[in-house]
Amino acid sequence: MEPIYLDYAASTPVDPRVLAVMLPYFHESFGNPSSVHRYGQQAEAAVETARETIAATLNCRPEEIIFTSCGSESDNLALRGVAMAMREKTGANWILTSRAEHPAVSKTAIQLEKQHGFQVEWLPVDKFGIVRPETLEKAICNNTAIVSVMYSNNEIGAINPIRELAAVCRAHNVPFHTDAVQAAAYLPVNVQALSVDLMSLGAHKYYGPKGIGALYIRKGTPIASILTGGGQEFGMRAGTSNVPLIVGFAEALRLAAEERAARTASLQPLRDHLIGAVLESIPYVRLTGPIENRMPNHASFVFKDVDGNLLLNLLDAAGFACSSGSACKTGNPEPSDVINALGLSRDWALGSLRITLGSDTTPAHIDAFLQVLPGLVQKSRSLTRG
Ligand SMILES: *Cc1c(COP(=O)(O)O)cnc(C)c1O
């Protein structure tokens, strides 16, 4: 039997329509967009068309989009670049971010604190993993260099109230960054409606290729480059533009926006069925993240007295590809920071499981999964207890 993929929050297959528009830029139109001749002009035109497509989806200007190598780099550029530039400009040296961020944000904040003299304040989340605007309102001050709160959480599916959080930042004149790498697959990414100053994206979470990301930077936001060299990307990010991947990024984002309602309508009922059945059929289980304000393809749980890694391996052996907290394969038995931020006791926090649906998921896949899960949870419980 073919394994069943239920880990679309970790990565997605490239949409054949996306691959088709990328292919000519590997071989026929291979020029360097910085070159003067017509090979260069052709490549440059492809990059600028992609930038315009993305700008139309985000409702911003093309020159406010910077291409990067991945979602992680976009997060790094936002935090590092704005923290450095804000301190230079105003002396502000505090970074406010939440306890439930992706490591691309949290590890960057920790390095800025340890090695560059910034101070980090970690905003607590509620029991659903959401940052409350009141929490930010209490913490923000005129020494804050940047606030970074993710749009939706990859591990627990929680959607943060980005407009409200951005409004708090705007009232205090502090740049606001959101990591939308996970959110862009299903949520609107209109940067004017959201009122964000910086937004990170990564194509492989919405049926685009790996190795390409972008950062939206609102005009006038203080930011320093973190990758110096040639003048590409308006001097913000050196390195020869990865033309095929940029073209693929734009097409994948365009399709995600165009098909957003249809994709949600097809997956959300399946997801709801999955959540309902798991909560009903298995003892000592809790949903992690909220039931409302949740990514439409996302289900995540903790099982009491279960070793999450063991459960993942049992599922894999049974032909189901899922994930625990995050995609890390370190064999680290500790709960992730996100799971820890929810305030669960250890006997619950160690047993996390994430199931994320996508383009190839069928009702039959979900039924097959629901057939095996209760037995495998029970098996990992008895093995864990020894
Ligand atoms: C996947 C992910 C990232 C990292 O993106 P890469 O392109 O894999 O570097 C960052 N933040 C969130 C929320 C993600 O889901």
Image: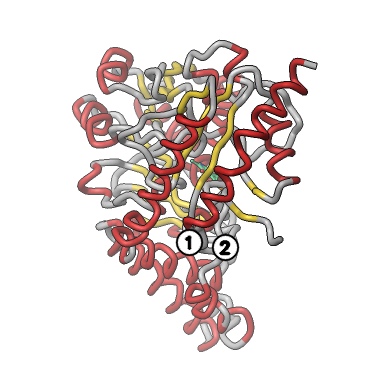
| Residue 379 drawn above or below residue 212 | above
| Residue 131 drawn above or below residue 328 | above
Q: How many other residues sit within 10 Å of disc 1, few (<14), some (14-19) or many (≥20)?
A: some
Left or right: 59, with 25 as reference point: left
Q: Position of residue 342 (x, y in %)?
A: 47, 18
Amino acid at pointer 1: Ser
Q: Which residue is drawn at 56% across and 23% down?
A: 337
- Near-viewer residue (261 or 88): 261
- Near-viewer residue (236 or 66): 66
Question: Which of labels 1 and 2 is toward the front?
Answer: 1
Q: Position of residue 368 (x, y in %)?
A: 58, 50
Amino acid at pointer 2: Pro
Q: Which residue is drawn at 63% across and 84% down?
A: 27
Cα–Cα gap, marks 1 and 2: 9 Å
What residue is pinned by disc 1? Answer: 359
Q: Which residue is drawn at 80% across and 16% down?
A: 386
Q: Is residue 227 visible?
A: no
Q: Earlier in the sequence, mark 1 or mark 2?
A: 2
The numbered dot on residue 189 is none
**Quarter of the figure with residue 239:** bottom right
Is label 1 in contact with label 2 (beta carbons under 8 Å)? yes
